[in-house]
Image (tube, rainbow, N blue to C red):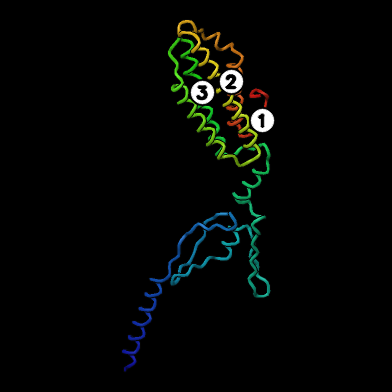
Amino acid sequence: MGDKKLGAFLMIVVLNTAMGLCQQIAIQNKSLVVNGRAGKVSVLVLSGRTFVDLQELADVSGGALTIQGGQLIVKLPSPNESSSPSASASSEQTDTTALSRDFMKAGIEEINLLREWASPLANAIQNGYPISDAWVAAYRGKASNGLHLASATVSTSGDQNAYQLLSKEFSNVSGWSEHLVEAFKSMNAAQYSTSDTALREDPMSQKIVSCAHSLASMLANGVFQDDGSCQ
């Protein structure tokens, strides 16, 4: 084979090899998470394998890259040293007054269910509308289910303490409801109808309203606090 032909052949081989490598090599920007710390890095994908720049790896992890005597030394922090979301969650759980997000959501929903139970009942009493056990039981069932759902979300000491107050409010509304229904049964609707003022001044009604306000404030702030309103 002549020199020109050999040179042309070698050039074709080189070009084919280079084109093959280009098809296998790809540089991409990826999100990398190390010990809970996230950041963007440039990665080199070669023949199905992924390579990361050591300096970028150290930067994302909060570590350091040094060169000593021709050696590359990478120091990465331990999981306990990183400010990861899981570490923050663990720190939050050590606070005995903190409420979890799931419990706060379930607690607020339960307060709404109790309000939906008490308000129509009060309206019926004020206007002398007929009240049946089945009608009241439907509201009670929804509020009872909501209380069970709140119980399932308890995960902190603050949740547990707040749940006790939420349960107390349920008991107060339940007792108040039973009292009104029994009183209604003993009289006809016209005799038992009452004014809005008289109902608001009822001690049990006032206690229920006061407890509801206290619970709503506590759940909104995400911190357990007992001001005695629900006792």
Q: CA distance from mark 3 to mark 1?
A: 21 Å
User: Picture coordinates of residue 119 (x, y %)?
Assistant: 49, 19
First in sequence, mark 3 or 1: give its number: 3
Dividing the picture into quarters, in which one does residue 204 lie? top right
Determine whether the residue tagged by mark 2 lies in a helix, strand or loop.
helix
Q: CA distance from mark 3 to mark 2?
A: 10 Å
First in sequence: mark 2 vs mark 1: 2
Left of 161 or right of it: where is 178? left
- Expressed as whole percent of the image width and height from the top left, the position of residue 53 reads 54, 65
The residue at the point 67 percent across, 55 percent down is: 81
In this rendering, the answer to whether 116 lies above or below 93 is above
Which tag is nearer the camera, tag 3 or tag 1? 3
Q: Nearer the viewer, residue 57 or 226?
A: 226
Name the secondary structure under disc 3.
Answer: helix
Judging by the rendered image, the residue that carries numbered circle 1 is: 225
Residue at 68% from the left image edge and 44% from the top image edge: 94
The answer to which of 156 and 38 lies nearer the viewer is 156
Mark 3 or mark 2, earlier in chain: 3
Image point 60% across, 16% down: which residue? 206
* Location of mark 2 (residue): 208
Q: Whole-percent x and y of residue 205?
A: 58, 16
Give the vertical position of 67 relative to 1 (above or below).
above
Classed neighbour count for the residue bearing mark 2: other residues with Cα under 10 Å, few (<14), some (14–19), many (≥20)? many
